[in-house]
Image (cartoon, rainbow, N blue to C red):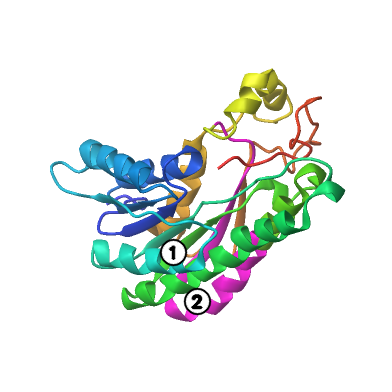
Amino acid sequence: MSLFDLTGKVAIVTGGTKGIGLGVAQQMAAQGAKVIVSSREQALCDQVAADLNAAYGAGQAIAKGIAADLNKIEELENLAKAGAEAFGGLDILVCNAAILPYIGESANTPPALFDRILTSNTHHNFRLCQAARPFMKARGGGAIVLIGSIAGHTASPSTMAYSIAKAGVAHMARCLADEFAADRIRVNCVAPGFIRSFSSQAVIDAGAADAIAAGTPLGRIGEPEDIAGAAIFLASDAGSFVTGQSILVDGGRGVLSPVTAPKGVPGLDAGTTYN
């Protein structure tokens, strides 16, 4: 068996119908996991689950869609319970769902929107992790992967609230790792740079992709599979001695060279994750 094999594991992936979340769900299914696909729309969850079953199920149901809104704690708590019941347990949680409803001058961020960005991206993901904990403990342990952002590690004024929230996600990984260690639950954070996805397509269509790639040491923008690879490492036996860490998956953009924003492209002053 490969160290990256997830056979017999049950994973919940939030924001799992598009972009990074879809890439993670697909690759975890390819590694043998049973996958709960979650997003706000049940129809989209069902469609992605059907696609995963057709591609990886070999005639068996290995995926199920369960809708949940990141803005609603009660739906997230139900997701943990329903996800565990779907396939008889829970081993992996990937908190990928995020909101980024404002890009612009930080002083102009509407107060209610600032609060919602922090609440949904940090507090509500915290509640989901807590809701998943007893189900993982019952299995003898598990792995939680929080999807942060390079914006949480570098200055990002035009996405100030989001940047602060994602910095909180990285520190939450450390705090939860310490709290959950007694239950053999590992908690880590993956911080993507600019990733090609449904949400980033408008920026790419604006002609910024080449400029972003030029400002990245590895010379390209990221793909959902790049984040999926890091998530699988952290969720599998390959990462069994890793907890409380944040891994930047950004082509070196955050630490190896200065981040230069392509002119006229909002939200890219330090790189923005588009889940």
**Residue on which disc 2 sits:** 181
User: Which residue is painted at 30% across and 40% down in the image?
Assistant: 47
Closer to the chain start, of discs 1 and 2, is 1
Q: Nearer the viewer, residue 109 or 50?
A: 109
Q: Nearer the viewer, residue 63 or 193?
A: 63
Residue 183: in magenta span: yes
From what the image shows, is residue 80 above or below residue 46?
Answer: below
Task: Identify the element where label 2 is drawn.
Answer: helix
Q: Quadrant of residue 104?
A: top right
User: What label sits on residue 75 in the rendered view?
Assistant: 1
Magenta stretch in the rendered image:
169-196
Q: Residue furthest left?
A: 59
From what the image shows, is residue 74 above or below residue 212?
Answer: below
Q: Are marks 1 and 2 in contact (CB under 8 Å)?
A: no
**Residue 191 position within the rendered picture, expressed as x and y whole percent measured from the top left:** 61, 49
Amino acid found under the numbered disc labelled 1: Glu
User: Which residue is painted at 43% across and 46% down in the image?
Assistant: 16
User: Which residue is painted at 68% across and 18% down in the image?
Assistant: 207
Q: Nearer the viewer, residue 63 or 244?
A: 63
User: What label sits on residue 128 in the rendered view?
Assistant: none
User: Which residue is painted at 23% across and 50% down in the image?
Assistant: 62
